[in-house]
Amino acid sequence: MQDKAGGRNPDDTPHLDEHAGDGVVRATTRMEAFADAVFAIAYTMPVVEVVIPRADKFYGAKLLELWPAYLGYGLSALVVGIYWVNHHFVGAIYRTAGHRFLLATLLFLAAVGFIAVPTRAFAENILDSAARIAGAHFYVCALAVAALCWWLKWRTGIAQGEIDERLVPAYVERLNRRYAVATLLMGVSVPLVFLRWEAGLALAGVVTL
């Protein structure tokens, strides 16, 4: 919109797709669309792995026996959902998406897309005492990698100047501290899970939530 003098109204805030950038820097629109597609696939694919048994007179019991698979889907959906909510929130903070920031985003999305594998390894073998421990190790390490990739994406965005310059610096710094502490705690959960798997899993779960 324009004011009476023909200039741009200072109250008009440009949308992300209007912030074209220059050179290899572009608006975040395509990045957000691609990320949403990855999140949608990562959110729904684990349910495909839940194999429904053949119907017979024990059908109800067989469906109940699938509870580890249901647990695996639930945990995958929870983790992917939490990261999508945070990604959606932080997406409003970024104004541009340069080359290095896009690479960091791809690394983070790869970690999110993989999370269903260690989740199934843990949940679907939870009744096996030996496999349960190994699965917990795998699961917590994967959660820590996802947290680290999230932090790297965030730090890359700050370092490359992708953050909205209108934000109050104290607000960005508060988010920076929060993500740094969460990543540090997730790092602590990795050696902890090898010492005592229940404690490491609990710490990783609390930090993720």
Image: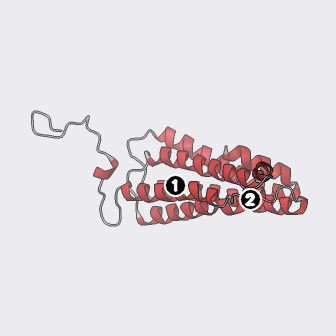
- Circle 2 residues within 10 Å: few <14, some 14–19, many ≥20: many
In the displayed structure, does residue 11 sit left or right of residue 26? left
Q: Which residue in the protein does label 1 denote?
A: 40
The type of residue carrying mark 2 is: Tyr
In the displayed structure, does residue 6 sit left or right of residue 13? left
Query: Residue 4 location, x and y as percent?
Result: 10, 33
Query: Residue 125 location, x and y as percent?
Result: 81, 60
Image quarter hosting the N terminus: top left
In the displayed structure, does residue 58 sit left or right of residue 172? right
The type of residue carrying mark 1 is: Ala
Q: Nearer the viewer, residue 27 or 112?
A: 112
Q: Nearer the viewer, residue 69 or 121?
A: 69
Image quarter hosting the C terminus: top right
Q: Nearer the viewer, residue 76 or 57?
A: 57
Question: Which residue is at a point 65% across and 53% down the rendered structure image?
Answer: 76
Query: Residue 132 location, x and y as percent?
Result: 84, 59
Pick out the residue farthest to the right.
Answer: 129
